[in-house]
């Protein structure tokens, strides 16, 4: 199993957004009249903190011997045996299957240390297609 990680900058950004929204909502409730937008701020803060925790734990892409899985909340998963085309673009990698499923990997979201792993896995997949 190979785990492709998010950039640390993305994770820190989601954490900061979560803390900022949460603090705006709490300060609004403590120092003023409670309004509906305070609840929305708290909800957004909790939501971004959840995204941070989820992405910190699961990371971006997981390559197993049978499948490639995007570890997003509603991420895609494709079987390696169904792959028929891999398109490498400057900012992304598109993996297409026989049954018209497509998984796009955004290279700009990947941590520098994981780019080497990604390149070797993509190269391995291209070799298996030939």
Image (cartoon, rainbow, N blue to C red):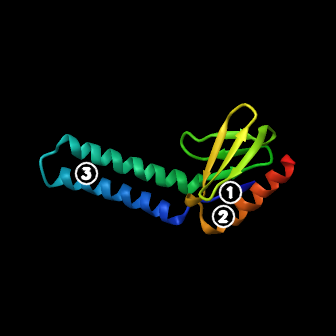
Q: Quadrant of residue 37?
A: top left
Instruction: Indicate the quadrant containing the N terminus: top left, top right, bottom left or bottom right.
Output: bottom right
- Which label number is shown at residue 85? none
The percent position of residue 45, horizontal first and vertical second, equals 35, 51
Please state which of the two labelled residues, at mark 1 or mark 2, is closer to the viewer: 2
Q: Report crowding for label 2: few under 14, some 14 to 19, many 20 or more residues within 10 A (C-alpha).
A: some
Quick check: can you spot residue 6?
Answer: no
> Is 74 left, or right, of 21 in this rendering?
right
- Give the residue pinned by disc 1: 3
Q: Position of residue 115 (x, y in %)?
A: 66, 64
In the rendered structure, find residue 25 and report the number of the disc placed on it: 3
Question: Is 1 on the left-hand or right-hand side of 50?
Answer: right
Foreground tag (3 vs 1): 1
Foreground mark, 2 or 3, reads 2
In the image, residue 53 above or below residue 99 = below
Which residue occupies 47% across, 50% down? 51
Q: Are marks 1 and 2 in contact (CB under 8 Å)?
A: yes
Q: Earlier in the sequence, mark 3 or mark 1?
A: 1
Position of residue 43 in the picture relative to residue 9 (left or right):
left
Residue 113 visible in rendering: yes
Compare residues 2 and 127 and report the one nearer the observer.
127
């Amino acid at each position: 199993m190979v785990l492709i990680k998010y950039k640390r900058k993305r994770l820190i950004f989601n954490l900061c957004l979560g803390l900022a929204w949460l603090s705006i909502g709490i300060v609004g409730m403590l120092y003023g009249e409670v309004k509906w937008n305070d609840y929305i701020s708290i909800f957004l803060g909790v939501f971004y903190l959840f995204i941070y925790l989820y992405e910190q734990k699961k990371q971006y892409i997981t390559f197993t011997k049978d499948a490639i899985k995007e570890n997003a909340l509603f991420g895609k998963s494709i079987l390696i045996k169904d792959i028929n085309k891999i398109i490498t673009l400057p900012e992304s990698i598109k993996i297409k299957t026989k049954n018209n499923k497509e998984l796009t990997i955004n290279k700009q979201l990947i941590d520098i240390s994981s780019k080497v792993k990604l390149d070797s896995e993509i190269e391995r997949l291209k070799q298996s297609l030939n």
